[in-house]
Amino acid sequence: MEKREPKLVIKSEYNYLYEFLDRNAITVIILIILLYIAIQANIILAYILMLGVYILFLILTTVYNKLKYNANVYKFYGDKIIYTDSFIKKETKRIKFEDIKEITVNQTFLQRFFKLGTIIIRSNSGTFFNNGILIFGVKNVDEQYKRIEKIIEEWQGKRLK
């Protein structure tokens, strides 16, 4: 593959509490309301069964998402980005710096609280729905964003010489 050492390697970080709150906060509120209804209607056994199924689903999706996050690697070289996803099926995507349209950072309130964020790299290559890279779960996202900008600015400076 690539013989040179990357200038930057980013791996998504799976934060259990953040992911739980982000994906399940409304479900937990609904479960609390359903518990009240189950107590009033005297159908606690059905509620416990439903809760057990939900907890099993939660465990399975957590394991799946953790493995998926761990399988993603984003390597920034002097002139390109190589994204590798080695979960279930192996996928490698290369974007040359000259094809990058924009790089943005997104942070929800919850992500700011957990010091996480998402970096979005849009490119001219690919299809309408597959024209870039999303890097989820980036720890210290502003610092990583600045490092990416610096690598691309160095490339632009070399190109202009």
Image: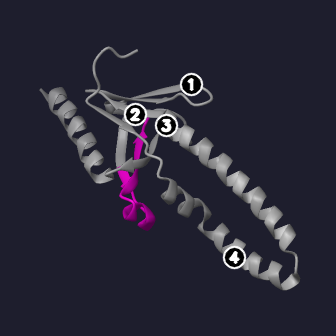
Q: Earlier in the sequence, mark 3 or mark 1?
A: 3
Secondary structure type for disc 2: strand
User: To which residue does mark 4 refer?
Assistant: 32
Secondary structure type for disc 3: helix
The spot of residue 101 in percent (x, y) is: 36, 42
User: To which residue does mark 2 refer?
Assistant: 74
Q: Nearer the viewer, mark 3 or mark 1?
A: 3
Span shown in magenta: 104-124
**Marks 4/1: CA–CA distance:** 40 Å
Q: Earlier in the sequence, mark 2 or mark 4?
A: 4
Q: Earlier in the sequence, mark 3 or mark 4?
A: 4
**Marks 2/1: CA–CA distance:** 14 Å
Q: Residue at x 48, y 47 (%)?
A: 14
**Marks 3/2: CA–CA distance:** 11 Å
**Marks 3/4: CA–CA distance:** 32 Å
Quadrant assignment, res 53: bottom right
User: To which residue does mark 3 refer?
Assistant: 70
Q: Nearer the viewer, residue 143 or 113?
A: 113
Give the numbered dot on residue 125: none
Give the numbered dot on residue 90: 1
Secondary structure type for disc 4: helix
